[in-house]
Image (tube, rainbow, N blue to C red):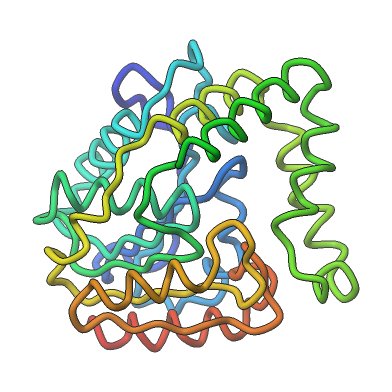
Amino acid sequence: MEIRLNNCAINYAERGLPQGLPVMFVHGFPFDHRMWDPQMKALPNHFRAITYDVRGHGGSDVGDGQYTIEFFVDDLIALLDHLVIDKTVLCGLSMGGYIALRAFERHPERFKALVLCDTKSEADTNEGKIKRSATLKSVKSEGVAVFADDFVKGIFAPETFQNHPEVIESIKQTIRATSPIGISGAVLALAARTDTTGVLTTIRVPTLILVGEHDKLTPPSASEYMQKQIAGSELHIISKAGHMTNLENAPDFNRHLIDFLNRMM
C-alpha cells in the first residue's frame, strides 16, 4: 500500500487484526520492508504487524536524496497518525534502531515498548564519518552492484555464508534495486545523526535488545551497554548470526520477539 506523507510517497504493508497490538518494524540500511518477512509470517494474528520502506528505499519515494534522521522520524510519526495508532511497539534494526531511539527521544508518549536490534545509541565517530564518505564515493564511482557485493561481506556471520546463501543473495538483490540517490542520502543521514546515548536512562517502557554474536558493525558490547543503561531491559545474544539477526537465525529471533510481545498484551 502507498500513502503520501510529508510530500513523500511511503510504501507500507500490514497483517493481523486491525484491533491487535500494533508492532511497527523499521528496516536497516540499505534494505526495505521485506527484510521483516520472516517476522511478518511468524507473528500471531492478534498482533497488528506493520512494515514500511524508509524514504529512499524500496517502494517509497527517493526524492532529492537530501535526508536526515529527523525526516525519517517525521515519516514514522506521520505513518502512525495515518494508521490512527496512538501507541505502538517499535522494532528497529541497525538504522531502524537509530530511528527508533530518536523517535522515542522526540515522542516517548507514542511508544508502548521498544525492540532494539543490532544497533547502538552512539553517533558516528570521526573515523566512522570517514568510512561513510568512502561508502558514498564507492556508490558514486563504482555503482550499486559493486557496493552490494562488498556490503554483504561485513554484515553476515560465517555460518550464514555456508548454510543460507539464499539469504545473502536476497539482500544483495534488495540493495541492487535501491536507488544510488537513496543510498547516498541515507549515508549522509547516518553520518549526521545525533547521539542518543543520553536518552537511554530516560526509557521507562519495556525494552528488548537483540544482537548477533558475530555482529561486527554494532557488536554485542554496544548492546550490553544499552542494556545496562535502560532500566529493566532484557538482552539476548543471537547465536550463528551477524548483523542481520532476524534473517540469519529467524527461529531464535522470533522466539524472543514473540515471547516479549505476548507480555505486552
Q: How many marks?
A: 0
Residue furthest out toward the top: 64
| Residue at horizontal 42 percent and vertical 23 percent from the top | 67
Q: Position of residue 179 (x, y in %)?
A: 66, 23
| Residue at horizontal 49 percent and vertical 11 percent from the top | 64
**Viewer-closest of 264 and 133:** 133
The answer to whether 19 is drawn above or below residue 153 in the figure is below
In the image, taking residue 167 as reference, residue 133 lies left or right, namely left
Q: Is residue 117 visible?
A: yes
**Viewer-closest of 15 and 91:** 91
Q: Position of residue 58 (x, y in %)?
A: 59, 35
Q: Position of residue 63 (x, y in %)?
A: 49, 14
Which of the image's four quarters has the C terminus? bottom left
In the image, taking residue 14 as reference, residue 248 lies left or right, namely right
Q: Tell me the quarter of the picture where residue 15 sits.
A: bottom left
| Residue at horizontal 26 percent and vertical 55 percent from the top | 197
Q: Is residue 1 visible?
A: no
Q: Position of residue 245 (x, y in %)?
A: 60, 70
Residue furthest out toward the front: 126
In the image, taking residue 59 as reference, residue 46 lies left or right, namely left
Q: Tell me the quarter of the picture where residue 156 sits.
A: bottom right
**Viewer-closest of 52 and 193:** 193
